[in-house]
């Protein structure tokens, strides 16, 4: 039986996408995928995020790993699941919300920063603990969390870039979330798809180099 996290592990990088319109979100996603990053986290900061998720899945099927981010309500979790999202990501770990996310049957990733928060997320049964904002501690902090949580699937998000990608994986990341250094807000707003594609290509090359 395939592991629930096989897709996340194989994909390696989730592009955290925030766009001012559904159309820009779809075009940005296309540029990211062309660049070689196939994990797309469509945040609910994006208008009509479920429609974006549905369209990307219709276009790419299993060739892309598409899910929802910034899930902050049970209704959003249900909407994303109905749209076909493979995974759901929340910036924090609220017990009632996390249970609603788990009820969808999708891969659930919820945010934590401290050891106590990591323990709480694991106790609730999440699939991945999103370490956010990971930039506060860097790869060394993620490595320190590996001491008490050697088997926990940890995904740093915030402060991840091509130059430090290898360090995050060496510290024990199961995957990483990449925001502004990949799905750059200004470039999306200006529809600069060449820049977005080039950013994705740098991330993809760094991931390939990291994995040998």
Image: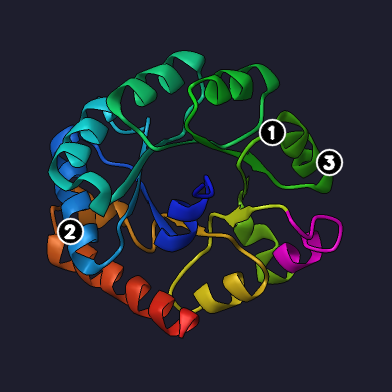
Q: Which residue lies at the image location 46% right of the left edge and 86% below the top edge?
A: 212
- Assess whether residue 145 is covered by the magenta stretch: yes
Few, some or many residues within 10 Å of mark 2 (<14, 14–19, 20+): many
| Residue sitting nearer the eye, 35 or 61 | 61
**Location of mark 3 (residue):** 116
**Location of mark 1 (residue):** 125
- How far separated are the C-alphas under marks 2 and 1? 34 Å
Q: Which residues are magenta?
A: 141-151
Q: Which residue lies at the image location 43% right of the left edge and 84% below the top edge?
A: 209
Whether tag 3 and tag 2 are in contact, CB under 8 A, the answer is no
N-terminal label among 2 and 1: 2
Q: Is residue 59 above or below residue 176?
A: above
**Location of mark 2 (residue):** 31
Q: Is residue 117 above or below residue 185?
A: above
Few, some or many residues within 10 Å of mark 3 (<14, 14–19, 20+): few
| Residue sitting nearer the eye, 127 or 22 | 127
Q: Is residue 73 above or below residue 180?
A: above
Q: Position of residue 184 (x, y in %)?
A: 31, 57
């Amino acid at each position: 039986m395939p592991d629930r996290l096989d897709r996340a592990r194989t994909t390696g990088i989730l592009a955290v996408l925030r766009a001012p319109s559904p159309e820009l979100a779809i075009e940005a996603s296309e540029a990211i995928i062309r660049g070689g990053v196939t994990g797309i986290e469509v945040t609910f900061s994006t208008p009509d995020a479920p429609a974006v998720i549905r369209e990307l899945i219709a276009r790419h099927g299993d060739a892309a790993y598409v899910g929802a981010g910034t899930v902050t309500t049970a209704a959003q979790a249900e909407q994303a699941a109905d749209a076909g999202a493979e995974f759901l990501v929340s910036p924090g770990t609220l017990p009632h919300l996390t249970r609603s996310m788990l009820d969808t049957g999708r891969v659930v990733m919820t945010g934590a920063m401290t050891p106590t928060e990591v323990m709480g997320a694991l106790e609730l049964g999440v699939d991945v603990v999103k370490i956010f904002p990971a930039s506060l501690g860097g790869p060394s902090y993620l490595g320190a969390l590996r001491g008490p949580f050697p088997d926990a699937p940890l995904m740093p998000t915030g402060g991840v870039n091509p130059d430090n990608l290898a360090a995050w994986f060496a510290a024990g990341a199961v995957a990483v979330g990449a925001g502004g250094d990949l799905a750059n807000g200004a470039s999306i707003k200006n529809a600069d798809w060449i820049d977005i594609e080039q950013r994705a290509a740098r991330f993809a090359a760094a991931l390939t180099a990291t994995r040998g």
